Amino acid sequence: MILEKIENRTAHAGVIGLGYVGLPLMVAVANAGFRTTGIDICSQKIERLKQGISDVPDVPNTALEPLMTSGRIQVTTDFSVLEDLDTVNICVPTPLREDRTPDMQYIVAASEQVAQRLHSEQLIVLESTTYPGTTEEVVLSILNTYLKKNAPIRSLEVGRDFYLAYSPERIEPGNSTYYVTNTPKIIGGVTPNCTDVAKTFYGQFINKTHTVSSSRTAEMVKLLENTFRSVNIGLINEVALICDRMDLDVWEIIDAAATKPFGFMPFYPGPGTGGHCIPVDPHYLSWKAQKYQYHARFIELASEINNEMPRYVVEKISHALNLQRKALNGSKLLILGVAYKKDVGDTRESPALEVIRLILDKKAEFVYHDPYVSNLSLDSKTTYHSKPLTADLVQSADCVVILTDHGAVDYNWLVEHAQSVVDTRNATRRVQMGQEKIIKI
Ligand SMILES: NC(=O)c1ccc[n+]([C@@H]2O[C@H](COP(=O)([O-])OP(=O)(O)OC[C@H]3O[C@@H](n4cnc5c(N)ncnc54)[C@H](O)[C@@H]3O)[C@@H](O)[C@H]2O)c1
């Protein structure tokens, strides 16, 4: 029955958690012709969405508005709508606790909401990034606990009466080449039937699906992808530190190595890793590996090196000031870019936050410009505001520190007006004049 509803697109689809992952997914599902309902606990977000206002740059208001006004998408904070949903995608956060262990509270809360309204012929898919075993050990276990409490009225069995799968979201915010519908989707069900139903669902709006043998396998695929990035970024950051000591240009070396048509993939150094994925997800794997008495050394080492990069950036700033016979104490710094990566407005885990904390510890003054981040809070007390990037602002800084290589900035113009520049992203590689003012990592 559910297969038929999915194939003729009369299924009522739902998405829980409307952030960077859930919102683009909801729009893709609705654009495929499904009546779609988004659920989020944040009432302000729901109010903004109702007015057609998106918080996620990958979903422009122009894409959202017509779907909202036509009623194809509805959004709510009321979980009772789950009773009416045929498909449910869970896209809630999976951060780390302070002790760097997985924080499962959001998945647990969403699963409990689903469990209270679970009905036959319903498909549940977890998309949040998490450790292998979560879909069965956390989500299914919560669903079964609720079912047991209500037995025999609700005696539903996974794979027979309802379907449960894991399908990791692979979206990269700000990437205009690969988005929800043209990025292949990995799917692993708790049972083969679950995989089939989930594959049929995603097949309606994703160009290519790839099924794997279990939900645990699919969970591990996502962690492999992100651990691969974290470890390679750690390696190239270490190579950058070595090149610095040897007075070699790491950027030139990477470009040259990348001419090899096989066996090399370029990764680039930077001020550290940021965002909701790379600094976080590998720790989900190392945490789970410990349960199997395995200590994941690469993950810990990469994280250690990546976390040290902000200190190295401050060393470079200090060096740039030293060349002008200035100290960090009392210098004015212009931080260019506080988002964790190019052309996005996400500051979660951004290395810029740590660089700013370190320079404030050294009693430097700072202002920042970020075209995507108008306000920045380092703690609950102070909020900083992005300054317009004027010639005066650039000239008045003792050093401009490029932490994010946003595409909208004219780097020729910037270097022309700057007294000195620390470039952590090689954003100034094409700058013709004033290379002598630039210090790169
Ligand atoms: N951001 C990325 O680039 C990216 C890429 C791939 C995968 N992921 C993974 O996807 C998941 C979601 O990440 P995100 O970046 O979209 O997070 P986000 O913080 O942008 O969005 C999460 C949303 O879930 C809502 N929420 C929290 N608890 C809820 C609950 N119990 N019920 C309903 N809504 C709830 C929040 O209000 C928020 O709107 C995470 O596991 C993340 O690791 C993120």
Image (cartoon, grey):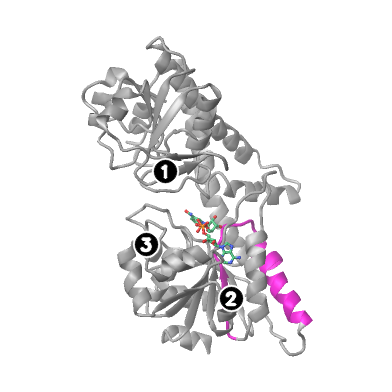
Work out whether residue 209 can be spotted.
no
Above or below for 307 versus 87: above
Quadrant in the rendering for residue 138: bottom right
What element does badge 2 sit on?
helix
On the image, numbered disc 1 is attached to which residue? 341
Q: Which amino acid type is marked by label 3?
A: Val
Q: Residue at x 48, y 68 (%)?
A: 46
Q: Is mark 2 within 8 Å of ligand 1?
A: yes
Q: Which label lies toward us, 1 or 2?
A: 2
Is 206 placed left or right of 144 in the picture? left
Q: Where is residue 388 in the image (x, y as percent from the top left)?
A: 31, 38
Q: Is residue 168 left or right of residue 416?
A: right
Are circles 1 and 2 on residues that touch, CB within 8 Å? no
Task: Give the residues drawn in magenta, as a range.
Answer: 121-149
Residue under pointer 2: 79
Q: How far apart are marks 1 and 2 (CA)?
A: 34 Å
Residue at figure coordinates x 44%, y 33% from the top left? 269
Residue labelled with disc 3: 59
| Pointer 1 with pointer 3, Cβ within 8 A | no
| 336 or 388, nearer to the observer | 388
Q: Which of 154 and 79 is in front in this view?
A: 79
Badge 1 amino acid = Lys
Q: Where is residue 231 in the image (x, y as percent from the top left)?
A: 54, 40
Query: Which of 260 and 433 lies nearest the eye of the viewer?
Result: 433
Q: What type is the residue that disc 2 sits on?
A: Phe
- Local SS, label 3: loop
